[in-house]
Amino acid sequence: MENQKIKIVIISDTHGHEENVKKVLEREGMPDHVIHLGDSEDSGIRLSQTLACPLHIVAGNCDFFSCLPKVDFVEIAGHKILITHGHYHYVSVGIRDLVEEAKVNDCDVAMFGHTHKPFLDQSDSEVTVLNPGSLSFPRQTGRKASYAVMEIESDGAVTYRQEYL
């Protein structure tokens, strides 16, 4: 059997603008999963209608009146992933609260949005922390729209890619 990777595209802070989501899907092809880390501003309705894979999505601080969860846990190929927008974990000032919640819930990956800045921290041997940045309103130097890709090999090994449009 061929070595099959599981591809997960991670996006955040689209704020109702799907043009760049379409560009990501054209570039990456249809992934096995899409994770949206909040501030979709439409509960992911339009996005879910264009995907041929599972969509895991949480509410952000701009998703007013949303029924989406603030925090969710996704299990994919033996990895337990905490997904949240991050504003309830105070990610603008640090990732400590997020890492602690991930550990308490036996997660090996924690993903957040909110800051509109790409971020990857693998310094804690127990929890990888990732923010894909924003596809609509990037705030990092250079202000390029960004997303992330997580790939899980059949042996469980994980790689992360930060991508820019």
Image: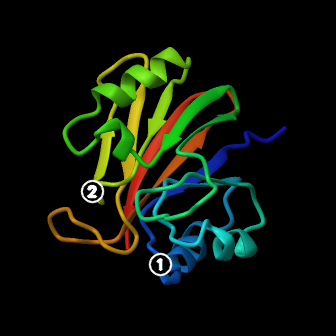
| Three-letter code for the amino acid on which mark 2 is drawn | Lys
As drawn, 161 above or below 103:
below
| Three-letter code for the amino acid on which mark 1 is drawn | Asn
Label 2, secondary structure: give it.
loop
Q: How many marks?
A: 2
Do the CB atoms of the residues marked 2 and 1 lie less than 8 Å apart?
no
Mark 1 lies on residue: 20
Q: Which mark is residue 92?
A: none
Label 1, secondary structure: give it.
helix
Residue situated furthest front in the rendering: 65
As drawn, 46 above or below 161:
below
Q: Quadrant of residue 125?
A: top left
Q: Residues within 10 Å of mark 2 (few under 14, many from 20)?
A: many
Horizontal and vertical percent for residue 87?
Answer: 35, 46
Residue at 47 percent across and 78 percent down: it is 20
As drawn, 36 above or below 165:
above
Residue at 42 percent across and 50 percent down: it is 161
Horizontal and vertical percent for residue 12?
Answer: 45, 60
Query: In the shown orientation, is residue 150 left or right of residue 43?
Result: left
Residue situated furthest right in the rendering: 1
Query: In the shown orientation, is residue 115 left or right of residue 107?
Result: left
Q: Which mark is residue 117?
A: 2
